Amino acid sequence: MTDLGDAPAGNATRSHVRGVPRQRHTSGSATSGSATSRSAPARSAPARSAPSRTRSRARPKVGAGRRGRPVRRGRRILRTAAIALSVLVLATAGVGWWFYEHLNGNLHSVPLTDGTGDSAGKEKADSFGRTPINLLVMGSDGRTNASDCKLGGGCSQTGVQSGSNADVEMVMHISADRSNATVMSIPRDTVTTVPACKDTETGISTNGYTGMVNSALQYGPACQVATVHRLTGIPIDHFVKLDFSGVVKMSDAVGGVSACVDKDVYDTYSHLKLAQGTHTLKGVAALEFVRSRHGFGDGSDLGRTYSQHLFLSSMIRKFKSAGTLTDPTAVYRLADAATKALTVDTGLGTIRKLIGLATDVDKVSAKRITFTTMQTAPDPNDSNRLVPAATAQSLFATIANDQSLTSSSGEKTAAASATAKATATASAVPAAQIAVTVENGTTVTGRASAVATALIDKGFSSGTTTGNAAGTTSTTTLTYGSGHKAEAQTAAKALGLPSSHLKQSDATGSTGLTLVIGTDWTSGTAYPATTPAPADTKAATSNAHAETADQSKTCAKVSPYRTVSLNGVAMTPTQAYRAAAGIKDSAP
């Protein structure tokens, strides 16, 4: 095709395409510090044969005499009723407002980052401008109050403590199209680099060190966020932190969580004691289950992450079940307990924002929520510690690239594709009614002409013109005037341009569409696809113990090894159960 004359960016020229009238145009002008480990002291492990790891009145007759009295009385009754009704409406509205303010008052929030660099990362929008959500869930082992001291133990000599470790760490990824989610656990025993950071509340800081990943919480939640982002490369948008008493409150608020164990189990460390089968875990029993390190798997922290996934899957199914969230009393208990139990980042620091997050999670069906554990290998320098396995990088990349783990190919489901298609075809403005000013913001001659011709070939108005941008730009943008978003969506769809590249003009009275082609689009008439290749699901989930939240019949695997000790004798959790017949079970 003949070059229609647009020159590289900065040259003040404008031309028309295929008989389009020529128009005048004036161009406008974390470093890591010492290697000293700050990790929590290694806990001694018992002997084992596996590696540690809420009657009507009659109508008056009308007669002679004082006929007006019943009417006046009736009016008084109506007036009184109206006043009473108004008071009732105000009272119930007041309760709602009080409840809202009460829940907001329960929340404790702190910044997501300590302001040091890009310590949490930034999400990438998909081709329709939607972004995923990555939430870091932290379970604190802190004995920072009398209640947690009683539940967690260990305060008999030290008393109430000030610091805490993140003994539970899960990255919860909610896809941009809200069709799927992945929850990845990071074992607390993982050794990694903790970057330089500072607790915004206490002022305690570190220059950075190599140590256990859970120890970063000693320097505040923002430090834990930065550490996980550095370890995985996954952007972290929000966090929630829960302590011992929080687990108890939450499990009680939902009326208990169903959990199954495949054998009798007695973890003499967390004090979990259950007979083989399914149980409803409430209060302390729920805490004992999610804390049990020696009762499941090989007795390591890996086994604990697996049982925690089963517990959370069961809780998710209960939330989604009929009746759980339709009972006002249950909802109040749950909301009150949750807001009292959680510390969140300031981005989630209001009830409205938390409801928005919960709504996003609720859009994902249980069968599309995958639980995994980061792949690990033994630390060459310490057999009681772990390091990320090479295969973990595939899992990290899959999450960071917003790819689903719930299908063999890793591609979006049909439902997700339908959602995306509906978004893309939202505009009902015919292309023939749309003229676009196409400007070349690259150093390649003829770019604006090529794209403008392609638009006209697709049925866009012959009023489409070309020209040159004021200068070279790295990003292609389609700017539209007030009230012209639908036209912009139509043009973007025709060009394959993601909606994240659309923006409304700030200029008063601007009505048209202006497409400035950037250096991210130096050839072709369709915007280059930026969607990553389908995830290698097999590689991403290899040795990651992947299971979906709909698997209601799965039982926690009790450790077959001698991971516990009773009266100084090492034994398996099942042997300990039988030997402790006099100790009451955690749940019936």
Image (cartoon, grey):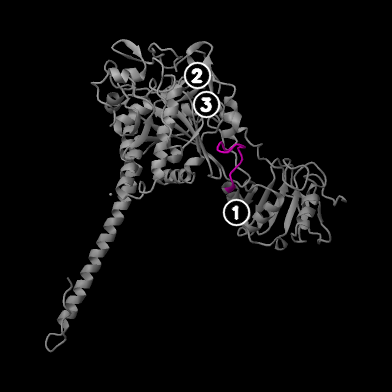
Q: Is residue 408 magenta?
A: yes
Magenta range is 403-414
Q: Residues within 10 Å of mark 3 (few under 14, many from 20)?
A: many
Say which residue label 3 marks. 374
**Quarter-wise, where is residue 148 in the image?**
top left
**Quarter-wise, where is residue 16 in the image?**
bottom right
Residue 246 or residue 580, whichever sits in front: 580
Mark 2 vs mark 3, CA separation in Å: 26 Å
Q: Of all residues shown, which one is farthest toward the bottom?
A: 64
Amino acid, disc 2: Asn
Q: Is residue 29 visible?
A: no
Q: Residue at x 82, y 49 (%)?
A: 6
Amino acid, disc 3: Met
Left or right? Give the position of 73 relative to 357.
left
Q: Of all residues shown, which one is farthest toward the right?
A: 2
Sequence-wise first label, 1 or 2: 2
Q: Position of residue 524 (x, y in %)?
A: 78, 45
Say which residue label 1 marks. 422
Do labels 2 and 3 touch, CB within 8 Å? no
Say which residue label 2 marks. 207
Q: Residue at x 25, y 25 (%)?
A: 584
Q: Residues within 10 Å of mark 1 (few under 14, many from 20)?
A: few
Number of marks drawn: 3
Sequence-wise first label, 2 or 3: 2
Mark 1 vs mark 3, CA separation in Å: 35 Å
- Above or below residue 399? Residue 99 is below
